[in-house]
Amino acid sequence: MSVFTRAPHTKSLSSLRSMMVDDIPNDDGKNAAEQQEPMSIGHQQQGQPHTTGSERREPAPIHRLVERDLPYHQSMNSLRVRHQTTKPVRFFHWYVEDWFHVLLRFRTIVSIAIFVAIWTSFLLLFSGIYVAIDRNNPNIDCGLGTIGNPITFYTAFAFSLETTTTVGYGLPNSSNAFFANCKGLQVAIYFQMLVSMFLNAFLLSFVFARLSRCEARAAQVLFSNKAVLKRDVLANGTKRYMLSVRVYDADSMYPIVEAHVRFYAVKHGSMHAKAFEDVRHPMKMEPMRVTSPNDDLGAVLYTSIPTCATHHIDYHSPILPPSKRRLGPEDGRVLSSSGFVLDPCGMDLREHDSYTGSQDGLRCVVCGETYTTVVNLIQHIQYNQHMERHDDVPVIGSHQELDVKALFKDRSKRPSPRTMKRVEGEMVAATDSGTNSGADTKIDIDLPAPWYEEYRAYLKQANIEIICVVEAIDPIMSGTFQALQSYTIDDIEFGAEFAPCILADKEGGKKDIGRLGRWFVGRSAVGRSVKVDLDSFHDVVNVPETEKIG
């Protein structure tokens, strides 16, 4: 009996079965469809050199957007992006319009040198003005030089410096004649002092802005050297793959405010290969939804204690291998091309939202009702089949056409890998007699050891860089800052978790650090409850296979 003989919007059972067969990995780890034509990473650009299958499989070198250039495996919290244009004059107004922030981005020594040069030029300018005014009135006593003997440039510079700083060393020739005789000189003094006030205000604001930059606070937000990718198996047999990083604020006694965490995936592909240096690539930063802490609640972290941020590599994740994406949600329990999976419409979704009943991700192809999980969809189909048989509803076009066993994979009744054995290269359930019990006992699950090879191969082939962003507010200056960290295939540990790094404070009873110590530091960490072992902060431990399989 066909499954969807009268449903034009749904594929037939035979086509569904053929797709299931095509998605079964072969001995070399590739699907049948992938063996016929290798899949290239990204889009083929116009003018891009043709590459063979072996060249396409060879991963290109990766150049991080976020470089780890600080001790303790940390980064400078900046992206390595620069501009290229043949007409730079067009874009010069960017820096002119925002000159203050451009000046703040310079190094402190460079900024100070620029300001000293501007201030000195200002003094020299008015020194020349004073010399010119005195020489234009040689027969009038302006109080700068004597009659017939105008002021020299060196004396004018000293007078300009005295006027700007209002030091009051004394006037040239000990005369106050410029207050009554030379109006032009009074105007010059007025404008010099006016400009001097603005320069002093600018210098004060610049020094304050430079020293109080909240972005420097990000240097104390520490990220783990490695990210861990771990597999969890639920009670119904569904496997979940969780990517986690560890975050800690080293200045834990003064916690940062409203810390949020985000993940982004950057697929470099082959853009850094020599053959593609002049090719424009559609690279973008794809958001990765955060499972813990829940990004629906803001993904808020409290970083005074080392904590983990976790991303679930589900059906909607941008770092899910394409072969697994074709298998569909819930780790391939229903094919994405079966018609039962709703189109995400370009939105960044999470499977967890379907599990908790807040987002429908599946629909019935017969009646169109939507459901959150495969279990709910199966119950709907079975219930309607029972009611339709009771009411003598025609089979064609009803739920009775749906073959639940053929469409949905039942993972809850599959034997444990410890009760399986390999027969002719395939994993089958072992019977009491130790022989194969038939074709129905074949199990389509992956072995414990190489489960991560598909993820490792895709992360390496696509040259994926995972960027973790922690954004928070400095409690002292009330400014927002961002801390960045980058992870590539070389920075990911598979089948592992972070080792504990917190221990009890043995000096918990020694709270008195003396008056001198309290005068210097105010509050002391001595006598606190716990200590964070920074030597083991980056450590990871392998998870036993028994824990990963369940």
Image: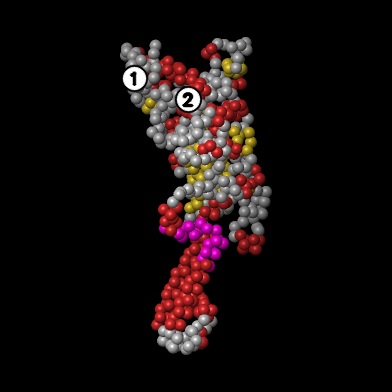
Residue 131 x, y percent position in the rendering: 47, 80
For this rendering, which residue is in front, 310 or 357?
310
Q: Is residue 529 above or below residue 314?
A: below
Q: Is residue 147 above or below residue 222?
A: below
User: Which quadrant, please, contains the N terminus?
Assistant: top left
Residue 369 x, y percent position in the rendering: 35, 26
Residue 374: numbered disc: none
Label 1, residues with CA under 10 Å away: few <14, some 14-19, many ≥20: few
Could you tell me which secondary element the residue under label 2 belongs to? helix
Q: Which residues are magenta?
A: 97-116
Residue holding disc 2: 327
Label 2, residues with CA under 10 Å away: few <14, some 14-19, many ≥20: many
Q: Would residue 355 be visible to someone looking at this image? A: yes
- Tag 2: residue type? Leu
For this rendering, which residue is in front, 89 or 156?
89
Relative placement, left or right, of 469 versus 12 is right
Relative placement, left or right, of 265 versus 359 is right
Name the image quarter holding residue 408.
Answer: top left
Residue holding disc 1: 8
Of mark 2 and mark 1, the one earlier in the sequence is 1
Q: Residue at x 45, y 79 (%)?
A: 132
Could you tell me which secondary element the residue under label 1 belongs to? loop
Q: Would residue 501 be visible to someone looking at this image? A: no
Q: Which colouring convention does the figure follow?
A: secondary structure
